[in-house]
Structure formats: structure tokens, C-alpha cells
Image: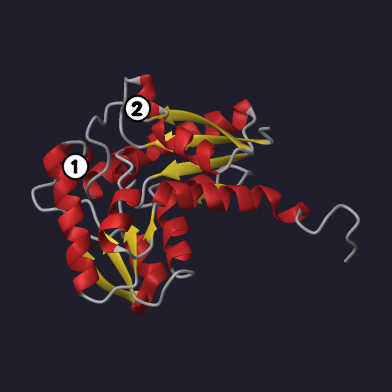
Amino acid sequence: MHKYIVGLIRVLTITDEELLNVHGRIIERAYPELKVISKCIKNQPQGIYDSKTEKIAKPKIIELAKEFEREGVDAIIISCAADPGVKEVRERVSIPVIGAGSAASSLALAYGEKVGVLNLTEETPMVIKEILGDHLVAEDHPKGVTNTLDLMTELGKNAAINAAKRLKEKGVDVILLGCTGMSTIKIAPILEKRVEIPIIDPVIAAGTVALHSLKRLNIWGEKNEA
């Protein structure tokens, strides 16, 4: 069934194998043609949540990406909505590199004109702001949440639901999840039921773009001529 192998970089240090592979399993469930191998950066148990932690993580992300390329994967996903290191990795490897933030932003624009971003904390990742431009009409975050670990609690999940409701009240017609930690707790389908508008999950969006990038050259069929 699998046709392509994707290397997925988690920007949160994870020792639990099941938790490490959860993003990859989400993508494989959505796209059976993809087999995902996951690895995480070291010594960042709280992941990336500000500019300082992003700066520390970038060299680690680059090294993991180069390692994946040496191992022969077909594409790389950096599973973080801030797209840390995406530009730098693209300069250093010869295979497709997909950032979850840019993938989710682009997909959100296919669903609506007025996009709301549900962030981990107060700040919307810059890559999302740049792509959405004037289509970004509202931002919110779960109150009391400071990192991805907080999202894994029942209080964190309820706070995310309340934030999504506030975004809908501001008139958005699609909500983009601005943190892949929300993919980890699989909150997108819960939010869709509660607010009844499309919810763009960044991990699934990254898988969507990865599959397209790997299939695009063959999409017209082998006999197609220019």
C-alpha cells in the first residue's frame, strides 16, 4: 500500500514511542500511500514556544533532516506550525520539505475568506501571518495554556474548545490550528462538532502537501506529453 516514505521531525523531545509516532499515524490514516518515520530533537522537553526555543532548535532540526535524507526518505515534514528551520533545511537537502504552518495556512485559504487562528499561546506564528495576510481576521488561544504539555490535560482541551467558540463569534468561516500539539490531542473533530465550521489540522495539512509534492510529476499519467 505504501508508496512513499516521509521523515517527520517532532520539535518536542519525546521518549514515549507511541507519543512520538502519533503525528505520523494521523498522516498514515489520512493518506495510506505514505509511510511516516518520526524522529524528535533532543533536550527540548517543552518543545518550541517562543523565539529563544526556536533558535535553539533550528540546528537540531537541520541535522535530523540531513540524517533523514541520508536514510533515503522521499520527503520531510517539520511538524511545527511555526515552520522552524524549513527555509534552512530546504537549502541543505534535495527532497521536498514541508512545514506544517505554511501547509495549514495555504489549505485554510481553500476553505474560507475569513480565517481565525487558534494558537497555543498569544502569538500567531509569523509564517501563518505572512501567508494569510488580510484573510487573518481573528486570533485566540486557550487560557491558561503555555506549552504543548498543558494541552494534553482536560483543562487544556476545554480551554481550546472555548477559544474556538470565541473565534466563531468573531465571524470567521474557517479555523486554523496554530499548533501541532492540538493535532496530538486530536482536537480538530471535537472542535468541528462544537463550532460547526471547518477546522484545519496542521499535521493533516502537512501530509496533504507532502503527498501532492510526491505525486505532482506523475499526476497526468506517464503517457502525457508536454
The quadrant of the picture occupied by the N terminus is top right
Percent of width and height locating residue 107: 47, 63
Identify the image quadrant of residue 217. bottom right
Which residue is tagged 1? 147
Label 2 Cα neighbours within 10 Å, binned few <14 / some 14-19 / many ≥20: few
Q: Amino acid at mark 2?
A: Leu
Percent of width and height locating residue 143: 10, 53
Q: From the viewer's perspective, is residue 96 above or below residue 117?
A: above
Question: At x 61% / y 26%, what residue is drawn?
Answer: 71
Q: Secondary structure at mark 2?
A: helix
The quadrant of the picture occupied by the C terminus is bottom right
Percent of width and height locating residue 21: 42, 28
Which residue is tagged 2? 19
Percent of width and height locating residue 177: 32, 55
Q: Secondary structure at mark 1?
A: loop
Going from the N terminus, do you reach mark 2 or mark 1 first? 2
Residue 117 shows in the view: yes
Q: Is residue 64 left or right of residue 57?
A: right
Question: At x 20% / y 41%, what residue is drawn?
Answer: 151
Identify the image quadrant of residue 117. bottom left
Q: From the viewer's perspective, is residue 73 above or below residue 84?
A: above
Identify the image quadrant of residue 58. top left
Q: Is residue 170 left or right of residue 202?
A: left
Question: At x 27% / y 62%, what residue is drawn?
Answer: 195
Q: From the viewer's perspective, is residue 107 above or below residue 113?
A: above
Residue 121 shows in the view: no
Between marks 2 and 1, how big is the CA–CA gap?
Answer: 16 Å
Q: Amino acid at mark 1?
A: Asn
Question: At x 57% / y 42%, what residue is drawn?
Answer: 31
